[in-house]
Image (cartoon, rainbow, N blue to C red):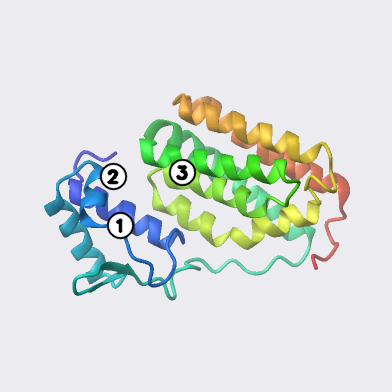
Amino acid sequence: MNPRRSLADVVFERLEQSIKSGAYADDERLPTEHELSAEFEVSRPIVREALRRLRERGLVYSRQGAGSFVRTQGLKNPLGFGKLENVADLLNCYEFRMIIEPEAAALAAERHTANSLATIGSAMELMRSAANRHAQREEADFQFHLAVCIASDNSYFSISMAALKEHLAAGLRFQGITIQTDASGTPRGLAEHERIFDAIRNRNGQEARSLMLNHLRGGRERLFERRSPGLAIE
């Protein structure tokens, strides 16, 4: 964390990051000043300053006596990644992810807070639940990777990941890695995510980076083995 940033800067940037990454729905009420003060372990005047700056940016608005509400229209797709057309596009997506996500995981190991670690843990619970229910896990997988990027304390990672949501889902659907279609793929993927989570929790940045890279590399290799690069994505 940059020591030149004030506490109000930190609270503002964390809330801005959460809003832009899609953590809140449009018109959803933010936690109260008291709740935010407890979450960030700062005083209420600091929270008020952060909320004031969010209002100036047009990210939140206030209702008399009701609190602050999120204005996300036009923010949920901050980057313009085009629709995936074929496997070659998907392979390029993996190549991009293999550059940014290992570094995000390493930073998450170094910088995570109790709250951001808990968010990764919640995503892991979603993944376990999906596996136990033999359900598709696209949303849980996305929430895990997004939570890791948020824990990196660098909004460029989380905004990029938020913009890739549909690409991640398309990749999983195209590979067919669900418990119904690949009896080995989903348990293996779950175990890989568990190891990444453990490395982040243990603040082992080097291991988190390596595990994330291997996880993404494995997904790319499984895709390449099964599909022709020119095959269209439905």
On screen, 172 above or below 119? below
Indicate the position of residue 217 as horizontal and vertical percent values: 70, 39
Residue 84 versus residue 25: which sits nearer the camera?
A: 25
Question: Which amino acid, mark 2?
Answer: Glu
User: What residue is rendered at 82% in x and 36% in y?
Assistant: 184
Q: Which mark is residue 65?
A: none
Label 2 or label 3, whichever comes before in sequence order: 2
The quadrant of the rendering that contains the N terminus is: top left
Q: Which mark is residue 39?
A: 2
Contact between labelled residues 2 and 1, with CB atoms less than 8 Å apart: yes
Q: Tell me the element at label 3.
A: helix
Asked if residue 113 can be seen in this view, the reply is no
Question: Which amino acid, mark 3?
Answer: Thr
Question: Which amino acid, mark 1?
Answer: Pro
Circle 1 sits on which residue?
31
**Distance of mark 2 from mark 3, alpha carbons?**
13 Å
Indicate the position of residue 210 as horizontal and vertical percent values: 59, 30
Label 3 or label 1, whichever comes before in sequence order: 1
Indicate the position of residue 157 as horizontal and vertical percent values: 47, 50
User: What residue is rendered at 40% in x and 52% in y?
Assistant: 155
Q: How many marks?
A: 3
Label 1 or label 2, whichever comes before in sequence order: 1
Answer few, some or many: residues within 10 Å of disc 3's Cα (few below 14, many 20 plus, some between 14 and 19). Answer: some
